[in-house]
Image (tube, rainbow, N blue to C red):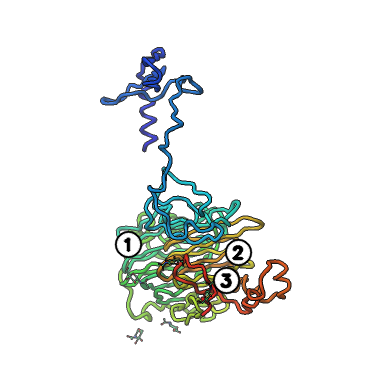
Amino acid sequence: MFYRLLATQVLFAVTLATPIAIERRQSASASDSPAATVVPTATAVGPPGASGYLRGSTDLGGFSSSNPVDTTADASVVSPDQYELAPGQDADKDLGLFLDLSTVENPQPIRGSTDAPTDPGPRNIALDRENSDAFAPPGTDAGTVPNGKWPLGLSANRHGLGSAGWARQQNIDALPIATAMAGVDMRLSPNAYREMHWHKANEWSLILNGSVRLNSMNEAGETFVDDLQAGDVWFFPAGIPHSIQASEAGVEFLLVFDSGDFSEDGTNLLSETFERNSKAVLAKDLRVDTSAFDKIPDGELYIFDGTPFPKNISTDNITGPAGVIPQSSTYSYHLSQQAAYEVPGGSVKIIDPVSFPIASNFAAGLFVIKPGAMRELHWHTTSDEWNYIISGQGRLTVYSAPASSRTFDFQAGDVGYVPVPASHYLENTGTEDLVYLEVLQAPAYNDISVAQWLGLTPKRVVKDHLGFSDDTLNRLPKIKPYILPGNTNLTQTNFTSESE
Ligand SMILES: *[C@@H]1O[C@H](CO)[C@@H](O)[C@H](O)[C@H]1NC(C)=O
Ligand SMILES: *[C@@H]1O[C@H](CO)[C@@H](O)[C@H](O)[C@H]1NC(C)=O
Ligand SMILES: *[C@@H]1O[C@H](CO)[C@@H](O)[C@H](O)[C@H]1NC(C)=O
Ligand SMILES: *[C@@H]1O[C@H](CO)[C@@H](O)[C@H](O)[C@H]1NC(C)=O
Ligand SMILES: *[C@@H]1O[C@H](CO)[C@@H](O)[C@H](O)[C@H]1NC(C)=O
């Protein structure tokens, strides 16, 4: 809009301006008015009420003896009485404490006491407060690591028909390193549908809120119907057609696809299948009169309102001679009913093809990290990791070979991405539980724990590498901790008492 307006004004100026010679009005004395008014060759003739010139004179280029730059002024200095420091901000920068800038007045990108750069602006203070590890990185961050964070709040929200729902997506267009997986957050209002469709990527889903009814059919004509609630998972293999309908409670779910360039806007739709084939062909295909297609939708349905589904699911259980899809290859998993694996500091539920065989190559961990606790330092051996923050907040450092690292801060609704085999952790930096999902492309969930690796290496070898004391060597675990508990006071640095 801005550029269009500018282009119109320029055109107007070029068309109507009367060229005049440069007229340089020197002020009486360069010192009391150093900025001379310089009239350009082509003046602007704008709409009524406009004044001034669209361009300056070429005389403003380069050195001039009447240079008005005042290098003595301290206008850009942010003095200590103009800002606050967060707890831990003056601590050694290699300690890299989490800086909670959320309520800090005029936060500054300061780490440690020896150097104190300030930011007079321009700035987006809300982003600086949410991303303190980007604004004032730990001293240990180094080199270049590609961006690994995409808040879905920055994605355009595509609305369905009427008030039926919406969807917003992340793929490589938003996050270029995310080549192996893409994600969508979708909302269906009460009784609304995501229309009957299919696509070329495999689709894995976690229900975030509400409940849903699913219908599908495979190549053999075996059918599938199930109702799922928050915390449950579904998987539809590539090419398998499916429909998704919200219950009267409505639903919100997360979709993960095994292709970084997947676009939710590019799926194959039932509505368009009927709109893009001739009526004679459709009539022959279904052995009906062409008038059967008088009421097919005009344009895609995508997300639209539906009639409530019958409470008795047997009514929607349509079977042919092939029967139903057997449980060994079913498309749903009631993960909400799985007991979590509890450890000090939190809990985890693993779901992968070992317990959900149809979900080929989708291995996921649903983690709950208590305040102050941390998903341990680890890496995955064979797959990139796609993350979604369900609630709470946390930070994660990606260490990339050989010598780079970058720390990201995450809030609920953010997607994170860690390329294989970069090491990382995820520390809860908030006051409530951090609940998040890790998704891998692997036949079984896998990770290597740094702590366990050291604990299962001869002490002499570890000592030769890292110079650890005997006490430190004796504390190294032989069992993978997954999650480590920690003090909820994140500037408290005595961690030895936190083993519970
Ligand atoms: C679902 O959303 C409602 C309304 O915001 C909220 O009260 C409820 O806690 C949510 N449920 C879950 C499982 O997040
Ligand atoms: C659907 O019908 C089949 C028998 O054809 C039965 O095995 C299956 O349990 C039924 N499913 C539901 C959800 O009613
Ligand atoms: C659900 O519908 C099936 C098939 O119509 C019927 O046999 C069954 O009794 C119904 N169940 C309930 C609880 O109404
Ligand atoms: C957190 O710990 C630091 C360091 O021991 C201490 O100075 C600070 O008062 C503590 N903060 C709270 C809120 O307890
Ligand atoms: C850390 O905390 C433990 C347990 O509270 C205590 O025994 C130890 O002396 C503390 N260490 C330091 C360096 O303060």
Q: Is residue 411 above or below residue 31?
A: below
Q: Secondary structure at mark 3?
A: loop
Residue 141 figure quarter: bottom right
- Disc sitting over residue 164 in the figure: 1
Mark on residue 250?
none
Point out the frontmost of discs 3 and 2: 2
Q: Amino acid at mark 2?
A: Ser
265 to the left or right of 481: left
Residue for point 41% across, 24% down: 55
Q: Give, as a three-letter code, the residue at label 1.
A: Ala
Quick check: marks 3 and 2 in contact, CB under 8 Å? no
* Residue 191 point in image, percent of width and height: 32, 69
Quadrant for residue 312, please give it: bottom left
- Given residues 174 and 423, the one toward you in this image is 423
Give the class, few, some or many, for how many residues have Cα within 10 Å of label 3's Cα (few <14, many ≥20): some
Secondary structure found at label 1: loop
Mark 3 or mark 2, earlier in chain: 3
The residue pinned by badge 2 equals: 423
Judged by depth in the image, the label closer to the viewer, 2 or 1, is 2
Q: Residue at x 43, y 76 (%)?
A: 225
Disc with the residue nearer the chain's start (1 vs 3): 1
Q: Mark on residue 360?
A: 3
In the picture, measured across the screen, residue 474 lies left or right of residue 310, that is: right
